[in-house]
Image: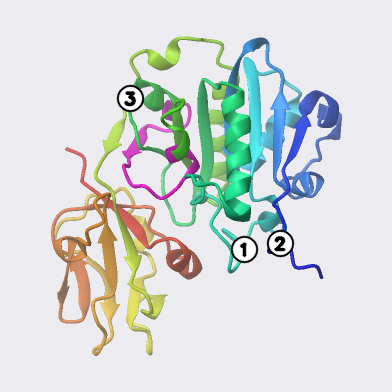
Amino acid sequence: MVDEADQAIPLRVLERELALPKARIPPTAEEFLELLAVPTLISVKGQDTSRTRIVSTLLHGNEPSGLRAIRSWLATGRIPAVNTLLFIGAVRTARLPPGFAYRFLPGRIDLNRCWFPPHTGRVGEFAGEVLRLFNQALPESLIDLHNNTGHNPPYGVSPRIGPEERNLVAYFADRVVHSPLRLGTLVEATQADFPSVTIECGRSRDPIADATALAGLERYLHDHRSEHLAADPPSMEILTNPQRVTVRDGVDLAFGEGPVADAEFTVARDIDRHNFERLEPGVPIGWLAADAGWPIEAVGPDGRDVSRELFTLRKEVLETRRAITPIMMTTNRRNALDDCLFYVVDPPE
Ligand SMILES: [Zn+2]
């Protein structure tokens, strides 16, 4: 097998009218993925060809709702309101057996952490080329569709939450997280150039998340209005001040109903039921082994670890110290270590 680690990442650019007409769209997302084979930018002519919108998805290989929605929509053969660029990112990661299994390839870089300049190295060069094609189209907006690995309602995330961003979120959800964190995401890298939001559609492989993605995509693609993004957005819950909670390097993590033998830190297996819930002080999060050190960090935009302000230890139980609202809690160990355990936001007023 050829080691592709040092080769440039390919990007296919296709015109829907030539390469992907309705008749060529296969019936399943898995077959569609095989047809695409590599990261692909599909350009679709709209009824109004003077404007362009962008949809991005599958930056994480285990988050298929956006890809499923794009496949379903292409299979209808409908013409969108305006020109549309459909970007499908981690196709090769998603194709690895058993399919839609990996966020990113083991030992490689997360495709939604690489969008800030300098665009060097194979992933950076790829990101730079995609951004060049996006900017060349002078888009009026971008949505980037994702899934969570834990139970979550649909919500948007953006470094800005002006009327444009909230109107974009409203196609999909009635909650938005205002996140000034700088992780290197596509939305962080484009928000200064055009309104841009991440949409978390719900849990991977949940049919409800797939339906949320498709319904929102159809509303977005078939909205003929031109000035609506600047209008007053519908009211929505705004969550602020996210802190990213990660497991400290080298801490042996497990999920369980009680402390797992040999694990330094066990997180309650049903923790994700608390997503978007206000937790009062004293709610248990997990268990620490008798000789284990402090297990987590919680870092906001200023880079300071505030984990001891948010959580405390009572005997061997890690519990909330003040009222918080956790979001994006995962019970997938690989995801918790590759990305984070969850985010904490201030409870809504
Ligand atoms: Zn994602």
Residue 162 badge: 3
Q: Quadrant of the C terminus?
A: top left
Q: Where's residue 244, x and y in %?
A: 32, 56
Residue 312 or residue 286, whichever sits in front:
312
State yes or no: residue 165 in magenta: no
Res 205 visible: no
* Left/right of residue 135 with respect to residue 185 in the rendered view: right
Instruction: Please give the residue where the numbered disc 1 appears in the rendered image.
Output: 105
Q: Given the image, on which type of amino acid does mark 2 rest? A: Leu
CA gap, disc 3 to disc 1?
35 Å
Q: Given the image, on which type of amino acid does mark 3 rest? A: Gly
Q: Where's residue 198, x and y in %?
A: 46, 38
Residue 311 or residue 276, whichever sits in front:
311
Residue 310: quarter of image:
bottom left
Q: Where's residue 170, x and y in %?
A: 42, 27
Q: Residues within 10 Å of mark 3 (few under 14, many from 20)?
A: some
Q: Which stretch did the figure color magenta?
A: 169-188
